[in-house]
Amino acid sequence: MTATMMTIRRKVFFLSRCETEKGRFMISSLLRASALLVSLSVFVSCLNGCRRKSASADETPDTSTYRPESTPATQFERDLKYERDAHFQHLWIFSRKDGKALTKDDSAILRTNAPKVVDWVVTDEGRKVIAGSNFDIDLANMTTLQKRFKIEDYSGK
């Protein structure tokens, strides 16, 4: 080989090497740029997702049926709500006919004549008892209780 051929061969090798390095550089630059663009897009979408919506005239108001219940005003109402939330089939309110507070004798008569009542709540400063049960009181026992107590039936109300 001649010297001229060797020189040409070196130049061709050098040029092809430079083009290959330029190509690699361009490809790695493109990859870096696209990775940066994807990362930036994900970051911006995360920030946008956390932003609160502003109230506009175009939005329709909430028409859901959920309305929070107000807190009952008196202790009797709170106790009655407590018994209703227990989902008994039968709820009765017993109070003395003279309006006085219930005594131990009254409690004994109530428990004797209503043995299937599982929940008793004394309320209204001891003047009323709320009874909850899934079983009805026998007719004979109910008649005995009606002679001594004022009975209000809240079953299904």
Image (cartoon, helix red, strand yellow):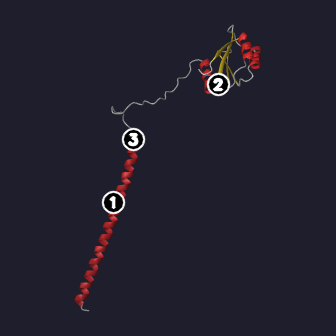
Kindly report which numbered mark, 1 or 2, lies closer to the viewer in this rendering: 2
User: In the picture shown, does residue 66 fall above or below 98?
Assistant: below
Image label count: 3
Question: Farthest front residue?
Answer: 139
Which residue type carries mark 2? Gln
Q: Which mark is residue 89?
A: 2
Which residue shows up at 69% across the image and 22% down it? 136
Q: Residue furthest bottom?
A: 1
Which residue type carries mark 1? Ala
The answer to whether the residues at label 3 and label 1 have Cβ atoms under 8 Å apart is: no
* Quarter of the rendering containing residue 29: bottom left
Mark 2 residue element: loop
Q: Earlier in the sequence, mark 3 or mark 1?
A: 1
Give, as a three-letter code, the residue at label 3. Arg
> Toward the viewer: 140 or 30?
140
Q: CA distance from mark 3 to mark 1?
A: 27 Å
Rendering coords of residue 2 (x, y %): 24, 92
User: Which quadrant would residue 48 be assigned to in this image?
Assistant: top left
Which mark is first along the chain, 3 or 2?
3
Sequence-first tag of 1 and 2: 1
Q: Dot 1 corresponds to which residue?
A: 33
Q: Report the side of 105 relative to 18 (left or right).
A: right
- Answer with left or right where residue 83 lies relative to residue 20: right
Residue 77 percent coordinates (x, y): 59, 19
